[in-house]
Image (cartoon, grey):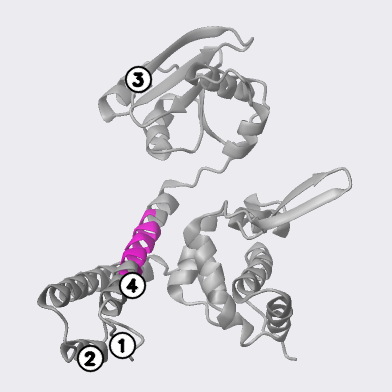
Amino acid sequence: MSNTYVGIDVHKKLCVYTELDPSGNVLRRGKFGNNISEVSDFASRIGSGTHIVVEPVLNYEWLLDQIEPYSKSVHVAAPYKVRIIAESKSKTDKYDSRVLADLLRTNYLPESWLPPRDLRSLRMIIRQRYHFVKMLVSLKNRVRHLLFLYGADLKASDVSSASARREISRLLLPDVSLMSVYQCLEEIDRLKETIGGLNEYLEAASEGIEAVSLLRTIHGMGLIWSITIYAEVGDISRFRSAKAFSSYTGLVPTVRSSGESVYRGGITHLGSKPLWHALVEVSLHVCRKSPSLNRLYNRVLYRSNVQKARVAVARKLSVIIYHMLKNSEPYRAETV
């Protein structure tokens, strides 16, 4: 059977597809629902010589898992690069699916890496934990806000600690406000228990992973941050350079240049949020044991602010991590 090329434009409820032959002629167009029954029906009608391409949006990983056994190959387009190549004044779902198929057919498709299933499962747990941690922080901020409304200021740094709860019990607050505070504290306790269970799962999952062991040699790099970086990065060899890896983390500045004018803005934030957060959080810990990173931190802090100084260290740390994982070498602490 001759090769055919199918581009799928994925939406929440519908997927629009276009199938091309090797010469670029449209063989068929159509749409199917983004649900298990209609995706399975579409997959059963795919020929064994079909190459599939989608953009990494919504539930594309699940979609490709259903289609892959029936097709010759599956591909993921790099969304930002495709957007530049396929920019058009007349943009429709049919056009987008046609462009994806055509780029794959002509071997001009800028591809994005598709992680293996076991790594995707680990990412799911990492991102679930990250979501719960954000909820936990939000609830703690809510407690402080409720107390602030009545002029209360806790001495305890952690509003859910035993000392903070003793302080709260001595405050003269309205019954409704006090009820709201204790409701938040109950939710915080439940979230802490859930996060603790996820931590145990991640600790067991990290056993035997060389990259996690290497990352933990960095001062201040705990288990959770190490396995987060491993899960979000995957195979380090897919990056051609340390600069490319830093760009993937979203820690590099945006650059706009025209003629002799060059504008450098804030960081791109295009990378994974758990990865970005892990690198920034660990940056201050690394500074305490690294004279060169400490000098970098203070140099940026002198001319800017704490946030930019931490990002600068995190970006430098991403370069260090790239070479560690690339060469399978542990972190070497500086002697001076």
Q: Say which element carries label 3.
A: strand
**Lateral position of residue 282 relative to residue 31, left or right:** right
Q: Which amino acid does label 4 sit on?
A: Asn
Q: What residue type is labelled 2?
A: Glu
Q: What residue type is labelled 3?
A: Phe
The reply to whether callout 4 and callout 2 are in contact (CB within 8 Å) is no
Q: Which of 165 and 240 is in front in this view?
A: 165
Earlier residue among tags 3 and 4: 3
**Lateral position of residue 175 relative to residue 101, left or right:** left
Residue 21, how many percent across, how many down? 57, 11
Distance, label 1 to label 2, CA atoms, is 7 Å
Residue 310, how many percent across, how many down? 61, 73
**Lateral position of residue 311 relative to residue 67, left or right:** right
Mark 4 lies on residue: 141
Residue 252, how many percent across, how many down? 67, 58
**Badge 2 density bin: few <14, some 14–19, many ≥20, Cα 10 Å:** some
**Badge 4 density bin: few <14, some 14–19, many ≥20, Cα 10 Å:** some
Q: Does the magenta stretch include residue 125?
A: yes
Instruction: Determine which of the numbered discs, if any, sits on residue 175 in the image.
Output: none
Earlier residue among tags 4 and 2: 4
Earlier residue among tags 3 and 1: 3
**Badge 3 density bin: few <14, some 14–19, many ≥20, Cα 10 Å:** some
Instruction: Determine which of the numbered discs, if any, sits on residue 32 in the image.
Output: 3
Earlier residue among tags 1 and 4: 4
Q: Say which element carries label 4.
A: helix
Which residues make up the magenta segment? Answer: 124-137
Mark 2 lies on residue: 167
Q: Which of 333 and 130 is in front in this view?
A: 130
Q: Nearer the viewer, mark 3 or mark 4?
A: 4
Mark 1 lies on residue: 154
